[in-house]
Amino acid sequence: MALARTRSVALLGVEGYGIDVEAHIGTGKPGLTLVGLPDAALREARDRIRAAIVNSGEHWPETHITVSLSPASLPKRGSGFDLSIAVAILAASGVVPAAKVQKTVFLAELSLDGRTRPIHGILPMVLAETVHGCRTFVVARANAAEARLVGEADVHALGSLAGVVQWLRGEPVEATEPADTEEQASALPESREGTAGPRPDLADVLGQPVARKAAEIAAAGGHNLFLLGPPGSGKSLLAERIPTIMPRLEREEALEVTAIHSVAGSLPPDKPLITRPPFCAPHHTATRAAIIGGGSSMLRPGAVSLAHRGLLFLDEAPEFARGVLDCLRQPLENGEVTVARAAATARFPARFLLVMAANPCPCGTSGPRCVCPSAARRRYLGRLSGPLLDRVDLKVELHPVSRAELLADQAFVESSAMVAERVAQARERAASRLQGTPWSCNAVVPGTELRRRFPPQPEALRVLGEAMDRGTLSARGADRVLKLAWTIADLADKDRPTAEEVGYALALWTGSAQ
């Protein structure tokens, strides 16, 4: 009888949990018993692992083998445990030194001929194990660049189980390693960040100066934006260009975003680190699980998490199901979503900038050409609930643009680079002011803290008071207007918002800015 132990990682949402993989070779009828809450894909690993070991030139023990994955109470899903189980069996058989495999984390799927195949979620797996002191990792070649994003990790990228065995024995592995194939190179889908073609620029949006200014304010303060206008007025064009004026991600933010996309399987194998704010635009037929996240067998991030630290664009927002739109309210407030299932509960980060676009009516035309009755228009826009719109700070109406307006606006339009510089400076001012607090941008500061710590000038508050007296502004709306005013003041390099900034913020909040 022999016993050996290796390490692997289980994913729950975007968080990794270390797993002890123990293999025991005992007596009894030949076979492999796998215990520790494995799913169907993991139970199928028995046949893959046996074929991989035999086709790698090693002996398969003709006795009973028990493999335990602990902690047993944590669900184990996917094929990423293949390599760890195979190495544990070989170590229990005496093929490789058992002492060396105890300190190494093995993360790869095995093909029947013994090649290692890449898996999703390598980055959060490596991050989780390095926190607990593990430093040595063995992964498939296509996962190497992603795993090496963690500087503390000593990553060994090996292409076959035979190469892993030789590495564990201290033998050279170059001669036995299979060459990279097209299948390995394309095993993981490419991300949108690496697509070719010219980058979109804010200067492409002509004739809509108020909407461009609103986009700048949204990027500078992290404020949500609602664009209302007929088709062709530039709503989608503007939304797609907002990420170009948002600041690049810091190192920790980039790792956080990359970990989410790693679990979703949307990273390229060569340059996996996401350094720009992501852009996610789901179709209006998307389900609640597709937007929030979830799944029956494996919990996966939804669109709100894929847009984490970036922008979530809902084009034709009234066409989304009412329940789908209302489920955005929790992540907009908390910056995360919690997906609960019978087997497990997962938490996904979801701090994103929401941009919604809508036509003024179902027919999409404007002015006298519209044939929709007033009741149909109210019913159409009424699909956007009041509580959801209360969480949108900027509301802008776009109008059709004439040829003369397009020509005139060319002299005033600014490139994304110019606007991005102002946005970065405004964010730096806000971060400096909020230093020592849990917040870094104006949109996430609670209203009570904003009034207590950073009160505006008295005449600025008078503008809000008059609006509340008229009944056009609620108490929560007043907090939102104050946050907007602070962002406008940061863009103008002012110490505090004045009545001018508050008045403009109020116009943007109510949708009356011209």
Image (cartoon, rainbow, N blue to C red):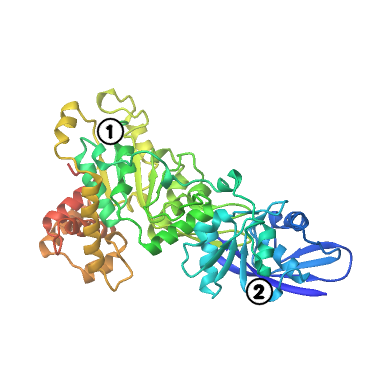
- Residue 276 lies left or right of residue 215; in this view the side is right
- Give the residue number, with chain letter if any, for mark 1: 233
Near mark 2 (Cα within 10 A), the count class, few <14, some 14-19 or many ≥20, is few
Near mark 1 (Cα within 10 A), the count class, few <14, some 14-19 or many ≥20, is many
On the image, the x and y values in percent for residue 283 come to 45, 39
Circle on res. 278: none
Please name the residue shown 59% across and 49% down the image.
Answer: 180
How many badges with numbers are in the image? Answer: 2
Whether residue 132 is visible = yes
Q: Secondary structure at mark 2?
A: helix
- Residue 151 lies left or right of residue 1; in this view the side is left
On the image, the x and y values in percent for residue 76 come to 65, 62
Rendered position, 297 above or below 406: below
> At label 1, which amino acid type do we have?
Ser
In primary-sequence order, the first of circles 1 and 2 is: 2
Circle on res. 100: 2
On the image, the x and y values in percent for residue 92 come to 76, 71
State the CA–CA distance, disc 1 to disc 2: 64 Å
Query: Which quarter of the figure has residue 200?
Result: top left
Query: Which quarter of the figure has residue 494?
Result: bottom left
Q: Quadrant of the N terminus?
A: bottom right
Query: Which quarter of the figure has residue 403?
Result: top left
Residue projecting furthest to the right = 29
